[in-house]
Image (cartoon, rainbow, N blue to C red):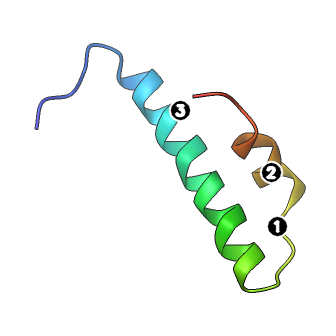
């Protein structure tokens, strides 16, 4: 798989998607998501 010309942007998008997954998972497990994770998840892609 070829990386795009903007690896830093790809890394940020991956972090946002991971944070969104964490929020969803914590919600389903009735766990509290840390504030910093919610802040990252709220960023636009």
Q: Which mark is residue 33?
A: 1
Q: Residues within 10 Å of mark 1 (few under 14, many from 20)?
A: some
Residue at 25% of width from left, 20% of height from top? 4
Q: In percent of the image, x 44 and y 23: which residue is there?
A: 8
Asked which quadrant contains residue 45, the reply is top right
Residue with the mark numbered 3: 12
Q: Quadrant of residue 44?
A: top right
Q: Which sits earlier in the primary sequence, circle 3 or circle 1?
A: 3
Q: Position of residue 33 (x, y in %)?
A: 82, 67
Q: Is residue 33 above or below residue 3?
A: below
Q: Residue at label 2?
A: 38
Outermost residue, front side: 28
Q: Nearer the viewer, residue 30 or 14?
A: 30
Badge 3 marks a residue whose secondary structure is helix
Q: CA distance from mark 3 to mark 2?
A: 15 Å
Front-most of 39 and 44? 44
Q: Is there a contact, CB below 8 Å, between mark 2 and mark 1?
A: yes
From the viewer's perspective, tell me whether residue 3 is left or right of residue 6: left
Decide: marks 3, 1 in contact (CB < 8 A)?
no
Considering every residue shown, the one lying at the far top of the view is 5
At label 3, counting other C-alpha atoms closer than 10 Å, the crowd grade (few under 14, some 14-19, many 20 or more) is some
């Amino acid at each position: 798989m070829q990386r795009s010309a903007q690896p830093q942007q790809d890394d940020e998008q991956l972090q946002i998607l991971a944070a969104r997954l964490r929020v969803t998972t914590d919600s389903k497990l009735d766990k509290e998501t840390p504030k910093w994770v919610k802040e990252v998840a709220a960023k636009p892609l």
